[in-house]
Image (tube, rainbow, N blue to C red):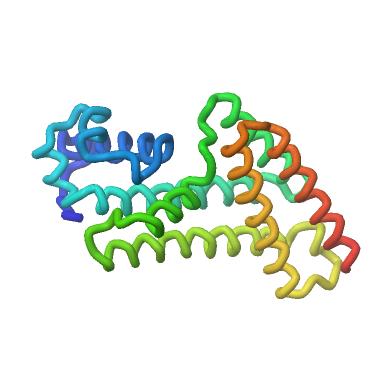
Amino acid sequence: MRLFIVKKGSTAVKVRERIVQAADQLFYERGFANIGVNDILKESGVHKASFYKYFREKGDLGLEYIRLRRERNALVFKDLTSRFSEFERVVSAWVIALKREAKMYRLKGCPFAVFSNQIRSSHLFSNNEQLNSAENEIGNVIQDWEEIFSAYLRTNPIQRNSGLSEKQIRSFARKMIIAYEGSVQVYFMTGKEEYLEEFESSLLLLGEFYKKTQ
C-alpha cells in the first residue's frame, strides 16, 4: 500500500476514507471473496484511477480492512471491561450490544473468522507476503482479546482474594473467546437470537465454575 502525506480534511483523505469505508461495509456484509474492486468503486463513488492511487489491488485493501477491524474491536472490548468490575455486568452489557446489532441486521458473524476462512480456502491474495500478513493480523486479533480479558480477570472480583493462577486466568480468557466465536457464528448461520442468550448463560456458568476453583 502506498503512503501519502496529506492534510487532514483534504480531498485526498476523504477519497481514501470513502474507499476504506465502502470496503469495510462490503467485506463484512458480503465477504471479502465476493467483492471486487468494481463493487467498491460503485459503493464509494470513487473513480478507478483514484483507487489505484492508494491501493495496488484488493488484497492491500483487505489488509487495511482487517487491521482497522482489529483496532476497533480491541477498543470495544477494552471499553466493555473497563466500565464494569462485576463479571455479570460485563457479560450482560456484551450480550445486550450483540442483540442490538442483531436487531439492526448488522451482526453478520465474526469478521475475522469469515475473512480467515475465505483467505485460506481461496487464492485471494496475489502473493504469499500478503497472505502471511493477513494470517498474522488474524493471530494478533486473538492475542489482543486474550490479553484484554486476562487483564480484566486479574482484577475482577472472581480473582480478588482468591488463588486463581495465571494459567487459570489465561484458560478462562480463552474459553470466553471460544464461547463468543461459537455463539456469534451459529447465530449468523441460523439467525436465532437464542444462541446469543446461550452465550450469556455459558459465560455466567464459566464464571461460577472459576469461583468454585478458588
Q: Is residue 82 visible?
A: no
Q: Is residue 78 left or right of residue 51?
A: right
**As displayed, is residue 52 above or below residue 150?**
above
**As displayed, is residue 140 above or below residue 93?**
below
**As displayed, is residue 103 above or below residue 187?**
above
Q: Residue 175 at x, y = what percent? A: 69, 60
Q: Quadrant of residue 96?
A: top right
Q: Is residue 115 visible?
A: yes
Tell which residue pokes out farthest to the right in this image: 212
Could you say which is closer to the camera, residue 140 or residue 187?
187
Give the residue displayed 18% in from the left and 42% down from the top: 7
Count of labels in the image: 0
Q: Could you tell me which quadrant the C terminus lies in?
A: bottom right
Q: Residue 28 at x, y = what percent? A: 42, 39
Give the residue displayed 76% in from the left and 50% down from the top: 203
Q: Quadrant of residue 147?
A: bottom right
Q: Residue 158 at x, y = what percent? A: 81, 59
Tell which residue pokes out farthest to the left in this image: 49
Q: Is residue 155 left or right of residue 39?
A: right
Q: Is residue 203 left or right of residue 15?
A: right
Give the residue displayed 62% in from the left and 38% down from the top: 187
Could you say which is closer to the camera, residue 202 or residue 173?
202
